[in-house]
DNA sequence: GGAATATATCTTATTTAATAAGATACTTTA
DNA sequence: TAAAGTATCTTATTAAATAAGATATATTCC
């Protein structure tokens, strides 16, 4: 019965929208908690997460992915370098530039804060069938891909703010 | 064949973890973009989002949900009140307290910034069957519920930082 | 009921994160 | 090779968020 199905779908859409937004709000709060525990700023932790997800990055890419100005990025990197989380390496591709990377010994100090959520996450997913896991993965992959495609399609914005993703050649 | 399935599951878990983290990183960047466009700070927009999701809230609850100190909340609310986004109403339940709510006329100015993503979101979900939608919804609902349960179970933290959710009686 | 304690918000002074503008060094293009 | 462009950093400045404490109302315990 199509009309009933449409009604169902509309309700599912609405519930999903709300759930996703709550999820994001919760993630943001959780990040602040972790940053607190590590005695750092949410921005600093954001940088470390970006390094974790995308590998060594240039300050310019970090500016794009974080929304900070390049001057702001320098300040954050100085802080993280002084506290021993990251180091600046010469960028073989461009001698004006640097590559920012983890100090490996410090990684666990940060990532261990995610062990508990990851455990929860695995518990939740343990109830899902393989097909269901694939469905959820498709949702996230498609959403992320859509966002990457949006790079550089916004109106007035700081010149250094494009999007998340592997740095473009 | 069980071992193969376990392998598949392990890969799906890993891919999902990464996708979720990328999704969150993207959401954070998107928020900054919207805040930029509205000439406000990410924190201010975070407050408006919380009001949108959870309805009128007290400054105390906003402190819990945002991770700011109560003094910081006052400052943010002063800013939002001055620029006409919110108002403080007397809280019938407690005369020390106030309820913060949207100025209705300003809601659309903010929410319209999400129209495009919501459209994308609907496009993505349009490809999903009802069962698949339900699966994705279950994922988010379960994850959000798990986070709510975590309230007040963290170690050292600011006294005003618990969790997201409807204010407890 | 009333004193003592706890809670909710706000105030003020202060710290410091982030910005803006511009400098330096290198790369790319013409 | 000169000119323009780009990547990062520097410095001075702005202003967001904190910390400590004040005020007003609630709650608890005798």
Image (spheres, coloured by chain):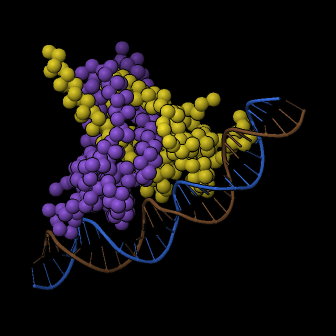
Chain colours: A purple, B yellow, C brown, D blue
Q: Quadrant of the N terminus of chain B?
A: top left
Q: Is residue A69 visible?
A: no
Above or below for A57 versus B145: below
Above or below for A31 versus A65: above
Residue A33, position as x, y percentages in the image: 46, 43
Q: Quarter-wise, where is residue B25 in the image?
A: top left
Q: Residue at x 21, y 69 (%)?
A: A96
Is residue B65 found left or right of C1 in the rendered image? left
Q: Is residue B17 visible?
A: yes
- Taking depth in this image into account, of A128 and C5 the one nearest to the observer is C5
Q: Residue at x 20, y 30 (%)?
A: B11
Residue B8, position as x, y percentages in the image: 18, 25
Q: Residue at x 53, y 41 (%)?
A: B161
Residue B7, position as x, y percentages in the image: 17, 25
Q: Quarter-wise, where is residue D29 in the image?
A: top right
Residue B43, position as x, y percentages in the image: 49, 51
- Taking depth in this image into account, of B74 and B123 the one nearest to the observer is B74
Q: Quadrant of the C terminus of chain B?
A: top right
Q: Residue at x 59, y 30 (%)?
A: B168
């Amino acid at each position: 019965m199509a009309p009933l199905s449409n009604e169902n779908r509309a309700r599912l859409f609405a519930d999903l929208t709300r759930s996703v937004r709550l999820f994001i709000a919760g993630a943001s709060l959780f990040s602040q908690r972790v940053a607190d525990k590590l005695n750092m700023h949410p921005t600093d932790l954001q940088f470390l997460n970006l390094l974790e997800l995308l590998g060594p990055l240039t300050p310019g890419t970090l500016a794009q992915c974080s929304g900070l100005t390049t001057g702001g990025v320098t300040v954050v990197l100085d802080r993280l370098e002084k506290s021993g989380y990251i180091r600046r390496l010469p960028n073989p591709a461009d001698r004006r530039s640097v590559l920012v990377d983890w100090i490996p010994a410090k990684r666990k100090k940060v990532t261990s804060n995610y062990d508990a959520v990851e455990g929860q996450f695995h518990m939740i997913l343990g109830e899902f069938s393989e097909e269901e896991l694939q469905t959820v993965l498709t949702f996230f992959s498609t959403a992320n891909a859509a966002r990457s495609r949006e790079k550089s399609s916004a109106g007035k914005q700081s010149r250094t703010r494009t999007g998340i993703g592997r740095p473009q050649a």
